[in-house]
């Protein structure tokens, strides 16, 4: 079972970072020759913000108490065992399985069956698969002991079915497809401390809810009702069925959850190669022309076949892919509310929608487009958040400006507005309208000269300084189709890096920013390979502390500790020094990094959230490879939310 799962997961990861960006933008080295050489010589590093000019202040810590160290635990060693099948956390802490695939969510749910014999109707009421982005929403009356935990379910594994995914006469069985669709989406669960002070799930609960690829959702914003959103099943172009490939997330200051649709393109096919060649909205996003890359749902569910059908209104389902790739807003406190796809955010393979909130209510939401050579974006709503007028906040995400980042080799940067009529985005240059730009955000970003990055994923905003950090997971194609540059300095980049941004005036809505590399992930410069030879430069990092590879999940806690989650192939030879995937903690002032937790073999660590007092932390163990959380070597592995607490009741990570 483990080998079959690993083969499937490897194929899924190959689709995660397919090179789609043709790389027509000039590299930073072409713009400012020598930027990469200066970086590799140490010109930009952990203390890079010492060189900031233009009135921008240097970084500060979250606390005025500088005598106590920010990180207060002893790091754990990497786990190298091939059969490692548990979670190890730092001394003085406890990590326990809290919520796993198949656990009951809604009141009528049946218990999970260890042989995976649950049908799709049962799965609709149970926890979905591959837990990912997550957020804790406290109840105001008891914020540190009672709330709603909301999490994404990104995709499904063959272990969802008793004997894996099957085909009959070249078609997927409809009952399997429905179960896979039911296991996608989002779970909302109520959680509370019991009389002993232990966090437990509240079941049943009127708040508990499953949202899936079969849940009706409203389309709002500029694309609502647009011709490009209409299908034979929805001639109005205002309602779509479901959300898919929900990876990272975000939240709003008015208490709603933002789930982001990442690699949605892998679910569709357009077999008309002539139509595909001229349809930018399919081709630029990498929709297949033979069979969908993930599950071949199109063989059982026609809405995933985007091949135009001249005999049907609106070409059948040719527009169905246009209805995915958005930010979906969910009200966790209203279980009867309909999720809303907010099209003003733009359409791409979005990893997250991370909030930065100014004192005067101005907002920005930062996102990475997780594909090799793609871009970093931010969305700035036109309106401002007003805590005194909750109703007025409800539609703030339907109007605003989508920007894409352009990074110069000297550490300066500019957000390029993707607005019709600005920056050459005109009818004469092939952009028919603002709706066209939002639908084809990647093409607009190409045109304005955005900087191609090494798989930009999660963003995190410092709770005090509003400094923005973004993970660039890796890019083994860097230096081939996309040139090496100052922000992406390694060819065949196998370990990735983290970049940091400081907006002008610390204003989330600013157009200009300064940037630097916070760290290059990878092994130490003096390390040797298995044959005793020096490592290739693309494996060498500059980490001050515990080494790691492929940073992915990223978040700040309330005190300004930066938590980093990793996602690499822990069986790969290049990861021989890393062991299993890790959760680490970094001090962004000193650059120190310590390993806090290690997950089971084959997993990705992803998603994290805290209680407001920082004394409870939840993380997700996605696609464990052996038998976690049973950890008995035989039970079907289950993606699982893990609760972490400190044995003395203190703040997670603090001294």
Image (spheres, rainbow, N blue to C red):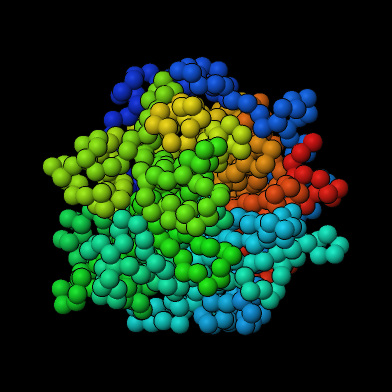
Residue 398 placement (x, y as % from top left): 38, 54
Please determine whether, in this image, residue 617 is positioned above or below residue 594: below
**Would you say 343 lies left or right of 639 here?**
left
Q: Residue 317 location, x and y as percent? A: 27, 71
Viewer-closest of 407 and 256:
256
Question: Residue 492 in the image: x percent, y percent?
Answer: 43, 37
Q: Quadrant of the C terminus?
A: top right
Q: Is residue 17 above or below residue 100?
A: above
Residue 326 at x, y percent in the picture: 39, 57
Q: For residue 346, say whether it is visible.
A: yes
* Viewer-nearest residue: 401 or 115: 401
Q: Residue at x 85, y 64 (%)?
A: 195
Residue found at x 43% / y 56%: 395
Give the residue drawn at x 17%, y 55%: 278
Q: Quadrant of residue 323?
A: bottom left
Q: Which residue shows up at 66% across the image and 29% down it?
A: 61
Q: Is residue 32 above or below residue 3?
A: above
Q: Is residue 476 visible?
A: no
Q: Quadrant of residue 575?
A: top right
């Amino acid at each position: 079972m483990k080998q079959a799962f690993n083969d499937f997961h490897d194929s899924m990861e190959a689709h995660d970072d397919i090179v789609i960006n043709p790389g027509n933008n000039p590299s930073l080295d072409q713009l400012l020759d020598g930027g990469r050489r200066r970086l590799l010589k140490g010109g930009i590093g952990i203390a890079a913000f010492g060189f900031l000019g233009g009135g921008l202040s240097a970084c500060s810590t979250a606390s005025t108490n500088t005598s106590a160290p920010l990180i207060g635990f002893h790091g754990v060693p990497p786990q190298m065992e091939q059969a490692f099948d548990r979670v190890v956390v730092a001394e003085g802490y406890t990590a326990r399985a809290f919520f796993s695939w198949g656990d009951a969510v809604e009141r009528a749910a049946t218990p999970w069956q260890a042989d995976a014999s649950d049908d799709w109707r049962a799965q609709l009421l149970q926890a979905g698969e591959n837990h990912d982005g997550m957020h804790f929403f406290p109840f105001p009356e008891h914020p540190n002991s009672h709330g709603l935990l909301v999490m994404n379910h990104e995709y499904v594994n063959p272990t969802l079915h008793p004997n894996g995914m099957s085909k009959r006469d070249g078609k997927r069985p409809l009952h399997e497809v429905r179960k896979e669709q039911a296991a996608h989406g989002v779970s909302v669960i109520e959680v509370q401390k019991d009389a002993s002070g232990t966090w437990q799930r509240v079941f049943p609960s009127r708040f508990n809810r499953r949202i899936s690829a079969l849940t009706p959702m409203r389309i709002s914003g500029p694309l609502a009702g647009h011709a490009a959103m209409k299908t034979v099943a929805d001639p109005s172009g205002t309602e779509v069925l479901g959300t898919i490939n929900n990876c990272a997330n975000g939240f709003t200051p008015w208490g709603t959850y933002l789930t982001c649709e990442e690699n949605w393109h892998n679910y569709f096919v357009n077999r008309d190669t002539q139509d595909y060649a001229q349809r930018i909205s399919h081709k630029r996003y990498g929709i297949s022309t033979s069979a969908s890359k993930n599950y071949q749902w199109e063989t059982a569910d026609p809405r995933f076949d985007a091949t135009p059908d001249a005999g049907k209104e609106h070409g059948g389902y040719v527009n169905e892919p246009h209805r995915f790739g958005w930010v979906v807003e969910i009200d966790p406190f209203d279980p009867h509310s309909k999720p809303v796809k907010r099209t003003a955010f733009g359409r791409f393979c979005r990893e997250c929608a991370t909030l930065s909130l100014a004192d005067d209510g101005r907002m920005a939401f930062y996102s990475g487009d997780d594909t090799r050579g793609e871009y970093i974006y931010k969305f700035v709503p036109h309106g401002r958040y007003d805590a005194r007028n909750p109703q007025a906040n409800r539609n703030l995400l339907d109007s605003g400006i989508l920007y894409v980042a352009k990074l110069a080799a000297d550490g300066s940067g500019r957000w390029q507005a993707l607005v019709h009529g600005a920056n050459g985005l005109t009818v004469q240059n092939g952009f028919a309208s603002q709706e066209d730009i939002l639908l084809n955000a990647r093409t607009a970003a190409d045109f304005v000269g955005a900087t191609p990055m090494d798989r930009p994923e999660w963003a995190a905003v410092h709770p005090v300084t509003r400094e923005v950090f973004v993970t660039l997971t890796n890019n083994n194609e860097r230096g081939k189709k996309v040139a090496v540059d100052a922000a992406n300095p390694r060819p065949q980049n196998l370990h990735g890096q983290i970049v940091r941004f400081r907006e002008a005036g610390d204003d989330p809505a600013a157009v200009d920013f300064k940037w630097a590399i916070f760290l290059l992930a990878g092994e130490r410069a003096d390390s040797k390979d298995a044959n005793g030879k020096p490592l290739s430069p693309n494996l060498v990092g500059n980490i001050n502390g515990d080494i790691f590879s492929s940073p992915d999940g990223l978040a700040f806690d309330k005190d300004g500790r930066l938590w980093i989650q990793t996602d690499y192939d822990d069986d790969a030879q290049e990861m021989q020094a890393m062991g299993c995937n890790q959760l680490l903690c970094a001090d962004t002032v000193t650059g120190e990094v310590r390993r806090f937790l290690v997950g089971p073999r084959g997993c990705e660590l992803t998603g994290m959230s805290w209680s407001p007092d920082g004394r409870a932390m939840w993380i997700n163990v996605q696609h464990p490879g052996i038998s976690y959380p049973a950890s008995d070597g035989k039970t079907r592995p289950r993606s699982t939310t893990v609760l972490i607490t400190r044995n003395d009741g203190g703040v997670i990570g603090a001294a």
